[in-house]
Image: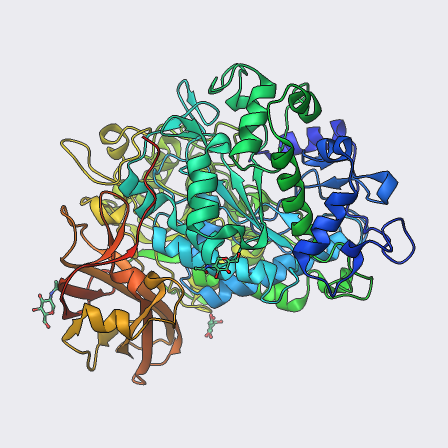
């Protein structure tokens, strides 16, 4: 997806006329009134097929693009497929803000809400976003499909858009996708809105020297593809039946994703059985242009027409275009025989079936059509946005300083840094207008704290530290807000360095030298905190990411102890030297030679490991009992029939008892990682296998919980991409670092749970 900074957005708003939102066809009196498509008791496929049968070829050809003109002869209005809602209804082409729809709830970015490890919360967020989105649509201010979630695993810390994702772990992203898509689409046959999982696949690079997202050929082994890059999409397509998938700009092993029939047909539609509801694939904007002969692109085809043909034939059903002057011309491509009538009809059927399932052709009294302005920015939505930010904040370091009551003798607080009162920065990329925007300074003042605020350097530039030192000297506590905001640049926001910005670091060092306690609140995504860990007066470090509309309140509630931190890092914090050791374009997960490998599963020398997160109390964990041995044949036999796919067969839940042995009530995220001598070598250090957030654990009142998991969590992926359950000794490690462990053995023959389709030779 093309990325817009706030500045670009306002320019776009001037240049591109507002297109308005959805206009439902008039099924009661319009030209379609006796067409089967308007019969809500008929099967969705039959309804969509009837409509496609009524369309002429030129009408189909005109509607293969994101800004579809509709078919006026049939009473179909123009429809804009490009609508964004990553963490709330956003500003973009398909969405018209104004009137009663001048604000929508802006949740934390995915990277922050993922850190909560609370999937019921993620589903709730999805329900609220889609409810607000549908309310916009019903009032002609948006359409019925939204290009969210972004579930690409956050492979490299330089990626400037990693904060749109739930982090670096394939299993975590899978679970996040499951909860979010269920929230967005709902669980019934009619979708509240159509969700779109993006970007399919192996997409996580915008710009690295002359390599850009438009020409990057990601070289990915079959093992890494099946094990790491694709599981979130398997969840979306096979298991969550997401309404649509976006193909990405990059190529995978030489074939651009939007012309890649191995990805879109062999795996997505056939292996994952995603054809069952005729779901559609939409291209990222201009991806089809760049896979043809466009400058700076893949040059995979010699003309734009050939690129359009290759894309449609490979299984992409709708082309988004963003660049002026490069309008795709499907009619010319069709006349030049670049794609078949069958491909055209199939694309149209898939698009229309998506709209049928979203209730586009249903009556005004149908499900979700009554959602309106009263359903936007509700108290529940506001409370959930605040809760998500509080749950997602991670306490990285604490020398006993936090929580701190910022009143009485501590009521003068220096708040320093550009993030401290920059409310829009709390939101992150792809934002809309929130009903309010509480930055930390605003939140602190409303708590009655006397704030001595001073701006700080954005990144590398050095700054005059005089004002900051004065503010600190007047105060008893210093809170520095720092980190890199990846949303300040547009398009090419990837980084070359993950070191703390030198200008900010110099200021923190100066402040830490004054003898006052310093709390650092790190925003944004990756920077190496090592230099701060070496400063004794930096008493505490919090990571808040992009915490959304109430992010400042959440940060201040955590600092003052009104809320207790229990978030866990959904990414590895790498040392800054990592960017020299791992070429950005190397997609391999496993280490080899001097290449250090990627993610907590393989990389050994993290500054903070995936799953790290401290509390204001101390927990102990134990596993009362768990069987020591399982026969693989028994596990499979007891499952047959219960799960359509063997990797979804349940494994006995692990009972855990969590005891708060400190003095403050707190949530606790139980994380279970698997390690052991089973499966292919080399073995990962450990792998996230199960997790659960427990709430409000009071001192001295142990809570018990069951950690659910499925065979997917025990299996490993072999070099051919097969998911295999191996015999061997397994150790479940609880928490990061490990607080308890259990060991069990699987006996018998290895069993293939998912046989992977091999790539074309
Ligand atoms: C795949 O989808 C078809 C419907 O098209 C369905 O009949 C079949 O059971 C599905 N297969 C699996 C394994 O779920
Ligand atoms: C300071 O605030 C805390 C709550 O954060 C409260 O318990 C305490 O009584 C307050 N102290 C003063 C001096 O106001
Ligand atoms: C597992 O726990 C036992 C004690 O019950 C301990 O001796 C062992 O070192 C632990 N293993 C790991 C890998 O943490």
Q: Is residue 88 left or right of residue 671?
A: right
- The quadrant of the picture occupied by the N terminus is top right
Name the spot of residue 115 as percent of width and height, x first. Answer: 40, 57
The quarter of the picture where the C terminus appears is top left
Choose between 64 and 336: the one closer to the eye.
336
How many numbered dots are placed on residues in this image?
A: 0
Q: Nearer the viewer, residue 692 or 612?
A: 692
Q: Nearer the viewer, residue 317 or 370?
A: 317
Q: x and y percent of residue 410 in the render?
A: 43, 61
Image spot of residue 211 (x, y percent)? 40, 21
User: x, y percentage for residue 318?
Assistant: 62, 37
Quadrant of ligand 3: it is bottom left
Asked whether, in this view, residue 639 is left or right of residue 725, the answer is right
Q: In the displayed image of the protein, which residue is found farthest to the bottom? A: 701
User: Would residue 128 be seen by someone viewing this image from the given angle?
Assistant: yes
**Can residue 90 be seen by looking at this rendering?**
no
Q: Quadrant of residue 358?
A: bottom right
- Position of 459 relative to 184 (above/below): above
Res. 132 image quadrant: bottom right
Identify the residue at image location x=81%, y=62%.
363
Left or right, 360 with reference to 630? right
Q: Residue furthest right?
A: 29
Q: Considering only vertical position in the picture, is 666 above or below 602?
A: below
- Left or right: 759 as drawn, with respect to 50: left
Figure check: 462 above or below 712:
above
Q: Quadrant of residue 319?
A: top right
């Amino acid at each position: 997806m093309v990325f817009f900074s706030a500045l670009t957005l306002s320019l776009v708003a001037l240049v591109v006329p507002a297109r308005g939102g959805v206009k439902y066809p008039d099924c009661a009196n319009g030209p379609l009134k006796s067409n089967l498509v308007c019969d809500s008791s008929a099967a969705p496929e039959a309804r969509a097929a009837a409509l496609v049968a009524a369309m002429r070829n030129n009408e189909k050809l005109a509607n293969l693009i994101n800004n579809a003109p509709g078919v006026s002869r049939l009473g179909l209005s123009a429809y804009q497929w490009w609508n964004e809602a990553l963490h709330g209804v956003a500003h973009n082409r398909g969405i018209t803000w104004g009137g009663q729809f001048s604000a929508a709830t802006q949740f934390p970015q995915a990277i922050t809400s993922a850190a909560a490890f609370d999937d019921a919360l993620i589903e709730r967020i999805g329900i609220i976003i889609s409810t607000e989105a549908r309310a916009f649509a019903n009032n002609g201010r948006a359409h019925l499909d939204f290009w969210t979630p972004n579930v690409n695993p956050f492979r490299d810390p330089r990626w400037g858009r990693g904060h749109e994702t739930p982090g670096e772990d394939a299993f975590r992203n899978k679970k996040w996708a499951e909860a979010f898509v269920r929230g967005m689409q709902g669980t019934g046959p009619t979708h509240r809105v159509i969700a779109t999982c993006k970007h399919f696949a192996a997409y996580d690079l915008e710009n690295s020297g002359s390599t850009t997202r438009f020409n990057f050929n990601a070289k990915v082994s079959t093992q890494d593809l099946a094990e790491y890059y694709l599981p979130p999409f398997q969840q979306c397509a096979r298991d969550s039946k997401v309404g649509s998938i976006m193909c990405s700009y990059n190529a995978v092993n030489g074939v651009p994703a939007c012309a890649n029939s191995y990805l879109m047909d062999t795996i997505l539609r056939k292996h994952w059985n995603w054809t069952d509801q005729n779901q559609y694939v939409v291209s990222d904007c201009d991806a089809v242009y760049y896979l043809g002969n466009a400058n700076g692109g893949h040059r995979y085809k010699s003309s734009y027409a050939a690129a359009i043909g290759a894309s449609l034939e490979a299984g992409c059903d709708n082309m988004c275009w963003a660049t002026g002057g490069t309008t795709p011309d499907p009619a010319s491509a069709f006349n030049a025989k670049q794609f078949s009538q069958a491909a055209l009809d199939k694309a149209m059927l898939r698009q229309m079936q998506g709209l049928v399932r979203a209730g586009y052709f249903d009556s005004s009294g149908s499900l979700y059509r009554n959602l309106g302005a009263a359903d936007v920015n509700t108290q529940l939505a506001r409370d959930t946005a605040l809760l998500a930010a509080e749950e997602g904040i991670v306490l990285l370091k604490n020398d006993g300083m936090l929580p701190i009551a910022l009143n009485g003798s501590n009521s003068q607080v220096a708040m320093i840094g550009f993030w401290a009162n920059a409310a829009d920065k709390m939101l992150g990329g792809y934002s809309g207008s929130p009903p309010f925007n509480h930055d930390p300074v605003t939140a602190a003042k409303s708590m009655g704290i006397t704030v001595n605020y001073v701006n700080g350097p954005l990144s590398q530039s050095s700054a005059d530290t005089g004002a900051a030192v004065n503010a600190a000297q007047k105060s008893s506590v210093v809170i520095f807000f720092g980190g890199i905001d990846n949303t300040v640049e547009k398009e090419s926001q990837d980084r070359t360095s993950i070191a703390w910005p030198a200008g900010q670091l110099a200021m923190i060092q100066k402040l830490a030298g004054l003898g006052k306690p310093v709390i650092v609140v790190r925003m944004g995504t990756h920077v190496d905190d090592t230099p701060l860990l070496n400063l004794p007066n930096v008493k505490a470090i919090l990571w808040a990411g992009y915490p959304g509309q109430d992010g400042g309140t959440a940060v201040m509630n955590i600092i003052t102890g009104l809320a207790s931190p229990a978030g866990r890092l959904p990414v590895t914090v790498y040392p800054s030297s990592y960017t020299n050791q791992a070429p950005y374009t190397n997609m391999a997960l496993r280490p080899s030679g001097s290449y250090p490998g990627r993610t907590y599963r393989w990389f050994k020398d993290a500054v903070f490991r995936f799953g790290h997160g401290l509390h204001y109390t101390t927990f102990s964990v134990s596993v009362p009992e768990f069987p020591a041995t399982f026969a693989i044949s028994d596990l499979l036999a007891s499952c047959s029939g219960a799960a359509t796919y063997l990797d979804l067969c349940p494994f006995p839940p692990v009972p855990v008892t969590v005891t708060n042995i400190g003095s403050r009530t707190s949530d606790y995220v139980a994380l279970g990682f698997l390690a052991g001598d089973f499966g292919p070598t080399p073995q990962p250090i450990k792998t996230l296998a199960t997790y659960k957030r427990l709430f409000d654990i009071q001192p001295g009142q142990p809570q018990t919980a069951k950690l659910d998991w499925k065979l997917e969590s025990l299996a490993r992926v072999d070099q051919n991409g097969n998911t295999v359950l191996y015999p061997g000794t397994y150790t479940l490690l609880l928490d990061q670092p490990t607080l308890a462990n259990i060991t069990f053995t699987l006996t018998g023959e290895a069993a293939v749970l998912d046989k992977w389709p091999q790539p074309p030779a």
